[in-house]
Amino acid sequence: MRKQFTRKSILTGLLFSLLSVGLVSFSPVSAPLYDTPQISRFEDQILRYVNEYRQSKNLAPLEMNAAISGEALKHSTAMAGGKTAFGHDGFDNRAGAIKRQLTSARKFAENVAYGHLDAKGVVDIWLNSPGHRRNIEGPYNVTGIGTAKQEDGTIYFTQIFVAR
């Protein structure tokens, strides 16, 4: 039997997870999601939903960038593996690493989430959070998305936004 999640239950779970950072035990991490063709399409779907929303607000679409996606993937993998707490720890280091690769980068933001979510589900959660929505609507033109999956199926998402 497949369990159905409502928007309210997903948001409640996300809020609880934010409140309980550090109190959660982590399962071992399976292969990062980027290893399979399905997941690269998954990350492309996240970008598509973000860009559809941006277009509805008359904002320019974001362009996917491999260097930024690499930093997002490292963060998602670290969170999924329990090496760093769920959240934005190390954001300044990620921004610095991106700045070294993209010297024209001048502004950065980041959205993270985790759960048993599909691409639309994670974007919907971000859009229903004022801070995350502000990042999606921000003056950014490039982005990177990284995902990592635990053995229990929990997916960790990181999207980094960059203005060049």
Image (spheres, grey):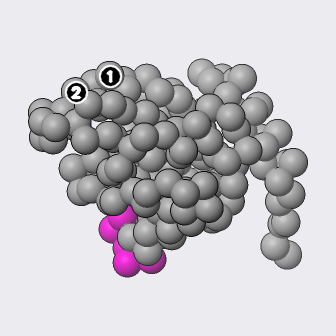
The disc placed on residue 121 is: none
What residue is pinned by disc 1? 92
Which secondary structure class fits the magenta region best? Answer: helix
In the picture, residue 71 is in which quadrant? top left
Q: Would you say 127 lies left or right of 68 here?
A: right
What whole-number distance in Å separates the C-alpha atoms at marks 2 and 1? 6 Å
Occupied quadrant, residue 14: top right
- Is 65 located above or below residue 52 in the figure? above
- Disc 2 and disc 1 in contact, CB within 8 angstroms: yes
User: Can you give x and y, in whole percent of width and height, for residue 50 in the image?
Assistant: 54, 58
Count of labels shown? 2
Between residue 113 and residue 134, name the one nearer to us. 134
Residue found 82% across the figure and 39% down from its top: 12
- Image quarter of the C terminus: top left
8 w.r.t. 5: above or below:
above
- The kind of residue tagged 1 is Asp
- The answer to which quarter of the image holds residue 110 is top left
- Above or below, comparing residue 117 to residue 161 in the picture: below
In this rendering, position of residue 119 left or right of residue 90: right
Q: Which residues are magenta?
A: 34-38
Identify which residue, 68 or 28, lies in the foreground: 68
Q: Which residue is mark 2?
A: 96
What residue is drawn where x is 33% and y is 59%? 64
- Residue at x 35% of width, y 50% of height: 141
